[in-house]
Image (cartoon, rainbow, N blue to C red):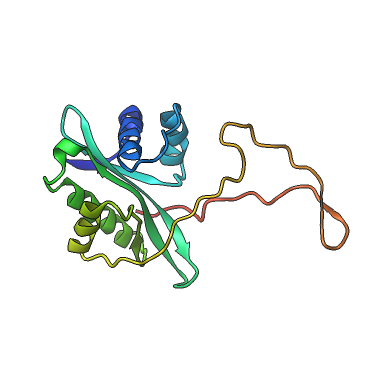
Amino acid sequence: MIRPATAADLPAIASLCAAHAAFERAGPVPADLATRLEPVLFSADPRARCLVVDAGDELIGYAAYAREFSTWYAAEYVHLDCLFVTEPHRGGGWGRALLDAVREEAAASGAAHLQWQTPDWNTDAVRFYRRAGAEARSKIRFSLPVRPTEAPTPTPTPMPTPAGGHATQLPQASAAGAWQG
């Protein structure tokens, strides 16, 4: 059955994320991923959501997603960050059920679109998404680290401004607002 993830699922979700990263030929996930995900998924105002496929004795898939804003459409959309079903359970309808569940939650929250990406070499996923009615958009995904991943957050230092003064602190990023639904 598909259900919202709970904090008790975090170790299993971290394992699914590791399997997903390996499948997509990405680097390893952080060793403390479960700890890092807890505030993101289970705070009073969660930044992201996660659904899991619960097979009774184990979790066999997950979908993680978050609301974002499209400047081009001047509308909120849901970004499906991850959708993964373990290999022995693929082809059983769980991927489509997860996608449909995220789509339903996106619609209920007022989002205009559901968007995601998949590696271009993953032809099975491309075929799956096209069968679900999705349209492919050609883009290349880039990633640029903004600080070392394991280093503590640096202390702000004075920076020259164009007017010759100094700025001592960068604005803090914040969530776009609470989810409804």
Q: How many marks?
A: 0
Q: Is residue 28 above or below residue 163?
A: above
Q: Which residue ends up furthest to the bottom in the rendered image?
A: 73
- Which residue is painted at 64% across and 49% down in the image? 172
The quadrant holding residue 29 is top left
Instruction: Tell me: 172 left or right of 20.
Output: right
- Which residue is painted at 17% across and 62% down in the image? 131
User: How far across and down, in percent of the image, does residue 87 sit?
Assistant: 19, 38
Q: Is residue 149 above or below residue 158?
A: above
Instruction: Tell me: 32 left or right of 169.
Output: left
The quadrant holding residue 51 is top left
Q: Which residue ends up furthest to the front in the rendered image?
A: 121
- Which residue is painted at 35% across and 33% down in the image? 18
Instruction: Tell me: 164 left or right of 92.
Output: right
**In the depicted view, which residue is nearer to us: 132 or 168?**
132
Quarter of the N terminus within the rendering: top left
User: How far across and down, in percent of the image, does residue 8 sit?
Assistant: 33, 28
The quadrant holding residue 27 is top left
Q: Is residue 37 above or below residue 143?
A: above
- Which residue is painted at 43% across and 31% down in the image? 33
Q: Which residue ends up furthest to the right in the rendered image?
A: 164
User: How far across and down, in percent of the image, does residue 138 sit?
Assistant: 37, 66
User: How far across and down, in percent of the image, does residue 162 sit?
Assistant: 82, 62
Q: Which residue ends up furthest to the left in the rendered image?
A: 92
**In the depicted view, which residue is nearer to us: 116 or 2?**
116
